[in-house]
Amino acid sequence: AQSVTQPDIHITVSEGASLELRCNYSYGATPYLFWYVQSPGQGLQLLLKYFSGDTLVQGIKGFEAEFKRSQSSFNLRKPSVHWSDAAEYFCAVGPYTGGFKTIFGAGTRLFVKA
Amino acid sequence: DAGVTQSPTHLIKTRGQQVTLRCSPKSGHDTVSWYQQALGQGPQFIFQYYEEEERQRGNFPDRFSGHQFPNYSSELNVNALLLGDSALYLCASSLGHGRAGNTQYFGPGTRLTVL
């Protein structure tokens, strides 16, 4: 069955430091992978997506993610975190041919300290 | 270009009542999906509508039902509310039902509190 795992419930980084949020997926075919960000009380904003091709994907707000098929991972990175990046981050897989739902991980809460 | 809009923003109901949530998709989109996001969790897929029909359903009871109108807007209805139905309900729209990897755009959500 398809699933997404985000191993870190929360992460704290200092402003200006680099960030990596982990995501592992279980999927039977070529995955379609997404990262979303959610600020408190808000909906989800798409940061970036991977469908095929270059395994390093650039997104908005200076984020990037790397797809590693051998590790079933799609980790999100940012070289220098800003205080405004504090939010909840969700990794997701799908929708996929023959099924239409997107499966989300449980999320990682990012705290940024001054 | 308006994005996905949802109404109302917040809603408070009591157990046993019924509720209707509304969603207008992003301009040009024809497919609407609904998700439930409980506190501290990721969104869970409820169902998806395309051409005014429910196309796929997640693990939610029949108390959850929906509708899609000819203008592609959608409603989510929940009957016999339970305390556990308290959550943020998210609507997402996309273009082209059945295409793998369709990007979904999410609305701000409706916060439902059941007392």
Image: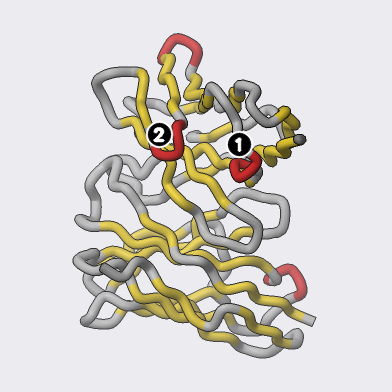
* SS assignment at label 2: strand
Q: Quadrant of the C terminus of chain B?
A: bottom right
How would you rate the neighbour count of disc 1 (Cα within 10 Å): few for under 14, some for 14-19, many for 20 or more?
some
Amino acid type at image mark 2? Leu
Instruction: Work out whether residue A30 can be spotted.
Output: yes
Position in image of residue B33 (x %, y %): 40, 62
At horizontal 41% and vertical 20% (from top left) the residue drawn is A67
Give the residue number, with chain letter if any, for mark 2: A33
Residue B98 vs B12, above or below: the answer is above
Same-subunit check for callouts 2 and 1: yes
At horizontal 63% and vertical 26% (from top left) the residue drawn is A16
At horizontal 77% and vertical 74% (from top left) the residue drawn is B83
Amino acid type at image mark 1? His
Position in image of residue B39 (x %, y %): 72, 58
* SS assignment at label 1: loop
Mark carried by residue A82: 1
Residue B103 vs B47, above or below: the answer is above
Left or right for B87, reference A60:
right
Q: Foreground mark, 2 or 1? A: 1
Residue B20 vs A70, above or below: the answer is below
Quadrant hosting residue A50: top left
Q: CA distance from mark 2 to mark 1?
A: 24 Å
Which residue sits furthest top?
Answer: A70
Using the image as rendered, state which of residue A67 and residue A63 is in the foreground: A63
